[in-house]
Image (tube, rainbow, N blue to C red):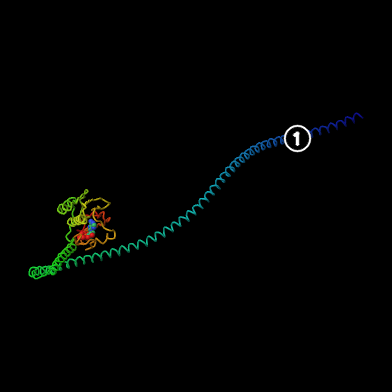
Amino acid sequence: MNLERCVEELKIIKEELAIENKEKIKRAAELVIANIELAFQNAEKAKRAAELMLANKELIFQNEEKGKRAAELIIANIELAYQSQEKAKRAAELIIANKEHSFESEQKEKCATELRIANTELAYQNKEKEKRAAELNIVNKELEQFAFIASHDLQQPLRTVSNYLRLLEEKYLSQLDEDARKYINSTNNAIKRMNLLINSLLIFSQLGNNRKLANVDLKIVLEEVIADHEILIKNSGALIEMSAMPALNIYETEMRQLFQNLITNAIKFQKVETQPKISISAEQKKDKWQFAVKDNGIGIEAIHYEKIFDIFQRLNSKAEYEGSGIGLANCKKIVQLHKGDIWLESKPKEGSTFYFTIPNLAVSATN
Ligand code: ADP
């Protein structure tokens, strides 16, 4: 019995064990599955970890790049800040320069306005001068006409006085005493002088009336003037030298008279016992020729430089030096006909130089 029970019990134990085994096998299978699951999860995690590492590396690299970029940006920023500063400095300088410029502009504008006003003033003055010159021209023409008529009309009564005086001399000379003869003699001298003055005035008033502009060699003109005054030159012992002369468009008759007046004056107004030395020269300037007639004569004080070019102005008595006092007035008129200037430089007791200019005149210009 005991055995049976034992077998029975063993059977039960066996069954229980079998169940337990089954359970264990099931459990083992579950464990295997769980293991596989875990292994799979592990593999996934490893993969994920690798990916994370890679992502990390990428991030580190990106961070590094960002750091580098940030450093570059900092440098660029510093550069920009520096440039900004420079620009601000430049802007400040420009503002100052602008201010200066606007100040200068204002000044220039002011200057320009002043110049405009001055120009208007000048234009006005010029117009006035032109008006005055035109008026003077008319007055001059009228004066010339008056001088012509007066001198012309004065000749006749003077001739009458002269004739009656001659008759008086012829018919009554024997009845006249010494004083009366002296008076007649003085009257005769006065008539001669008045005749000279009237004739001079007549010549002056008609000067240039029939002028004709032509191209003339001034060397020839001067040689002819010198030849015409051969006796005067010989008697005075004057030495005349002449530089090269140009051929110019001039009024020949008038120019001849101009040289003649200056040369005869240079001989006439000579110091006692001094050989007259005269030099005539021509020098080309920009748009004109400048002539000079230089002497070693008595000279003229500066105070008389203007006056001697006026009609009948003489500095010396007619007893000392003969003349009508119209020669230089003629010279001035002739130079003005040529649109030139005349003036002099002189030292009393040393000599004088008379200068005049002749601009280049076109032959087509009004004669
Ligand atoms: P005139 O010779 O008939 O006296 P001008 O008109 O030629 O008249 O000259 C005016 C004055 O100028 C002269 O009287 C003289 O006093 C002075 N003069 C002219 N030329 C000279 C000269 N070369 N040297 C000194 N004085 C001069």
**Residue 165 placement: quadrant:** bottom left
Please rate how many residues cluster around mark 1, counting C-alpha atoms within 10 Å: few if below 14, some from 14 to 19, many from 20: some
Which quarter of the image is occupied by the N terminus? top right
- Answer above or below: position of 196 versus 39: below
**Which residue of the protein is positioned furthest toward the front in this rendering?**
178
Kindly identify the residue that appears in the image at 57 percent across and 46 percent down: 78
In terms of depth relative to the viewer, which is nearer, 265 or 156? 265
Q: Locate residue 1 relative to residue 198 in the image: left or right.
A: right
Residue 328, can we see it? no
In terms of depth relative to the viewer, which is nearer, 131 or 333? 333
Could you say whether the residue bearing mark 1 is in a helix, strand or loop? helix
Name the quarter showing ligand 1.
Answer: bottom left
Residue 95 percent across, percent down from the top left: 49, 54
In terms of depth relative to the viewer, which is nearer, 281 or 83? 281
Kindly identify the residue that appears in the image at 75 percent across and 35 percent down: 31
Residue 294 percent across, percent down from the top left: 24, 53
Kindly identify the residue that appears in the image at 26 percent across and 62 percent down: 307
In terms of depth relative to the viewer, which is nearer, 117 or 234? 234
**Which residue of the protein is positioned furthest toward the top in this rendering?**
3
Residue 28 percent across, percent down from the top left: 76, 33
- Answer above or below: position of 115 versus 161: above
Tell me the residue that label 1 is attached to.
31
**Residue 316 placement: quadrant:** bottom left
- Answer above or below: position of 53 versus 213: above
**Residue 206 placement: quadrant:** bottom left
Q: Locate residue 13 relative to residue 304 in the image: left or right.
A: right
Q: Locate residue 69 relative to residue 303 in the image: left or right.
A: right
